[in-house]
Amino acid sequence: MATHAYTVAPGWVEIEAGGEFDRFPDRSSGALAPVVVKLGLARGLQLDLDGTLVHPPAGGATGLGDLAVGLKVRLLRKAPVLGDFSVQPALKLPTAPTASGLGTGTTDVALLLISSHDLGPLSMDLNLGYTRRSGPGTLAPRSSALWTASFGGPAAGPLGWVAELYGYPGTAGAAGAKPIVALLAGPTLAAHAWLAFDAGLIVPLAGPQPRALYAGAVVNLGHL
C-alpha cells in the first residue's frame, strides 16, 4: 500500500505492475491488476499514469477501471523529523463504466504525504492521504483517508522483506464503510539493479478488509 518519497531520475521511465486476489468474508472473490508508469520530469519531480484491470467481486465483467494521473514532488532531503519528504497530488477521472462495477463515476482529487527514513539497514515509509470525490456518494464516499507505516530490509543476498500496517478511517454516506486496519507482509527480490519483485499476503485486523494475496514487479526501462 505504501510508496516511498523518492522519484525517478529525469528522463527515465519505470513501470510498476502487479496483481491482487481478494477473498471476502461472504466467500466472494475479486481481483485487481494495477499498472503505474512513472516518468522523471526533473530532479525531484515525477509524473505517474495509473490504470487498473478490475475483476469486481460481484461477478461483473473484467475490464479497465478508472484512469488517474499524479505528480510526486520531493520537497525535503534528510530533514530532522520528516526525513525524505514528498507530496503527491493526483486526479482520477471517471473513464470506466459504473454499471459493471469497474468505475465509481466520480472525479477524485487526492493528496498523499510521504515521509521516508533510513534506520540503519532498515527503511521506513510513512504515508498519509486524503481523497475528495464528486457525485452524491452512492457508489463511493465523498471523502476518504488512509495511513500506512511500512518497514523493509535485507534478508539474505538479493532477498529482502517488507511488513506494513495500514488503515482506512471510517467513511459516511450511502457508500460508507467501517474503519479498516490490516497487515501486509512478504518477501522481496532484487533480481537486478533495474528489476525487483515482491509477493505476500494481506491479513485484516479490523473492518471489512478482505484477505488477499499479491505479487508484483518494478522494472526501470532506462532513459528515453
Image (cartoon, helix red, strand yellow):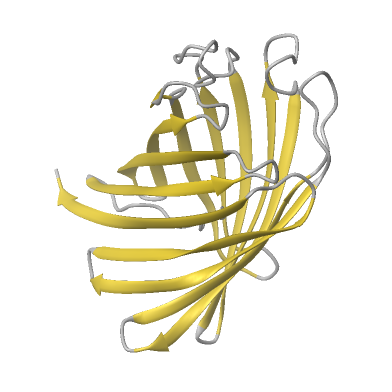
Residue 98, image x and y in percent? 54, 12
| Image point (45%, 39%), residue name | 32
| Image point (55%, 46%), residue name | 22
Q: Is 84 placed above or below 181 here?
A: below
| Image point (70%, 67%), residue name | 81
- Residue at the farthest front position: 27
| Image point (39%, 37%), residue name | 48
Rendered-image quadrant of the C terminus: top left
Q: Is 199 placed above or below 107 here?
A: below
Q: Is 72 placed above or below 154 here?
A: above
Q: Nearer the viewer, residue 74 or 212?
A: 212
Q: Nearer the viewer, residue 117 or 170?
A: 170
Residue 88 appears left or right of 139: left
Q: Quadrant of residue 26?
A: top right
Q: Nearer the viewer, residue 87 or 132?
A: 132
Q: Is 98 placed above or below 190 here?
A: above
Q: Quadrant of residue 95?
A: top left
Residue 133 appears left or right of 152: right
